[in-house]
Image (tube, rainbow, N blue to C red):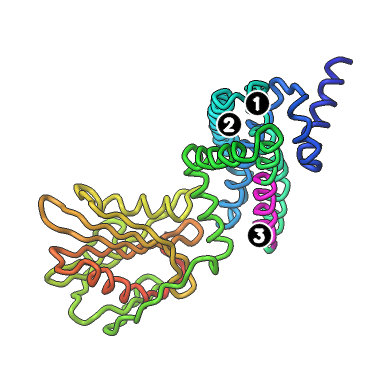
């Protein structure tokens, strides 16, 4: 009976933290939650990880059940990371409160204020199931999950305000967000890339004048390259076309991405060969649309074996197939002009189904 009573209490508090956040926040100062906060934040991390991975797979037309074991394992890791992040934030808030003589504040209150703010994330897998079984509702699902995320943020603000004065609560909120960004940066990136995959119109359109020259058909894609760029097929694995001038090269590379990879991780993987031995003093990345498709645009300026090299790569991932334009400029007198030339060529890129 006691176990049943504790379980009922736990369910009730979780539900209250989700549907009645103001009432729950007011109870933080007088209620003792014990290990309940740990269970909540771990479960929220698990739920959030399962949701994002399910959406990543759904955008690629892959049914998530085939990756169940891997999804569960990775979700447990994220749950643990989220719990550690919440603990660090709670400890810093507690120490800060002690130093400012908020002596009635306990570490348990600090931790549970952060932990229970994540409770709305527990329902995200249910929302993701809608997208899995009705992919046409993917955009609607993403909007609902965004609202849930905003609701979690609002809950965090309410909880901190309930146990701290306004200035201290504001600082604690900034600390929690900063800690989350540092500890969960990879998941933030996955959320961002998944949003672009679901709604490509979120990415700004690359604005540049398309290049003029000879139009090439390359495995379902078309690309217009100025006449001075000599075309060849070198037979290098993963490279389907090569262009070069006296001071620059362009490789058109294809690769099959790992099923759970997002656009940015695909861009990192396919760029490795181009970056071997390269030391960058300037690294920039942006997300842009090229003729309706979202591309990861990487720009780097540095040296290779003591020689000045500038690299620009445009990578596009469609489902599990990806293709990249990899530009390399040797001793460019004007790096920005070289990058502009690469953009002009990339602006002519019309991509069909990417090669596997």
Relative vertical location of residue 232 with respect to residue 89 in this rendering, above or below = below
**Residue that badge 2 annotates:** 86
Q: Residues within 10 Å of mark 2 (few under 14, many from 20)?
A: many
Q: Quadrant of the C terminus?
A: bottom left
Sequence-first tag of 1 and 3: 1
Highlighted range, magenta: 137-153
Residue 138: mark: 3
Name the spot of residue 266 as percent of width and height, x first: 41, 53
Name the spot of residue 28 as percent of width and height, x first: 74, 29
Q: Residue at x 83, y 31 (%)?
A: 12
- Whether residue 15 is visible to the viewer of this picture, yes or no, is no
Sequence-first tag of 1 and 2: 1
Q: Label 1, label 2: how many angstroms apart (C-alpha)? A: 9 Å
Relative vertical location of residue 288 with respect to residue 154 in this rendering, above or below = below
Q: Residue at x 59, y 33 (%)?
A: 79
**Residue that badge 1 annotates:** 38
Give the residue at the far top of this rendering: 2
* 137 left or right of 278 in image: right
Q: Which tag is nearer the camera, tag 2 or tag 3?
A: 2
* 198 left or right of 320 in image: right
Q: Determine the main secondary structure of the stretch shown in magenta.
A: helix
- Mark 1, secondary structure of its residue: helix
The verdict on residue 77 being magenta is no
Instruction: State which quadrant residue 214 falls in.
Output: bottom left
């Amino acid at each position: 009976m006691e176990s049943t009573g504790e379980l009922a209490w736990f369910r009730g508090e979780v539900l209250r933290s989700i549907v009645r956040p103001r009432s729950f926040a007011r109870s933080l100062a007088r209620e003792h939650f014990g290990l309940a906060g740990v269970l909540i934040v771990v479960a929220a991390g698990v739920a959030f990880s399962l949701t994002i991975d399910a959406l990543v797979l759904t955008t690629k037309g892959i049914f998530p059940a085939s990756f169940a074991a891997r999804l569960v394992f990775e979700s447990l890791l994220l749950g643990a990371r989220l719990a550690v992040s919440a603990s660090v934030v709670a400890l810093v808030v507690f120490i800060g409160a002690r130093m400012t003589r908020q002596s009635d504040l306990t570490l348990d209150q600090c931790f549970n204020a952060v932990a229970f703010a994540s409770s709305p994330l527990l329902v995200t897998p249910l929302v993701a199931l809608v997208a899995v079984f009705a992919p046409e509702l993917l955009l609607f699902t993403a909007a609902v999950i965004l609202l849930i995320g905003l609701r979690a943020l609002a809950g965090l603000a309410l909880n901190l305000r309930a146990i701290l004065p306004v200035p201290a609560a504001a600082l604690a909120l900034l600390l929690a967000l900063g800690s989350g960004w540092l500890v969960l940066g990879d998941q933030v990136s996955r959320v961002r890339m998944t949003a672009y995959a679901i709604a490509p119109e979120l990415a700004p359109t690359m604005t540049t004048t398309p290049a003029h020259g000879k139009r090439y058909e390359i495995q379902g894609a078309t690309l217009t390259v100025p006449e001075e760029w000599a075309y060849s097929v070198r037979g290098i694995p993963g490279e389907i076309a090569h262009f070069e001038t006296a001071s620059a090269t362009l490789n058109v590379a294809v690769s099959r991405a790992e099923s759970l990879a997002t656009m940015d991780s695909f861009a990192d993987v396919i760029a490795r060969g181009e970056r071997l031995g390269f030391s960058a003093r300037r690294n920039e990345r942006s997300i842009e649309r090229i003729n309706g498709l979202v591309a990861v645009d990487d720009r780097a300026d540095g040296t290779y074996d003591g020689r000045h090299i500038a690299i620009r790569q445009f990578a596009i991932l469609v489902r599990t197939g990806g293709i990249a334009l990899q530009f390399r400029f040797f001793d460019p007198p004007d790096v920005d002009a070289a990058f502009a030339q690469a953009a002009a060529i990339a602006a002519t890129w019309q991509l069909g189904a990417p090669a596997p």
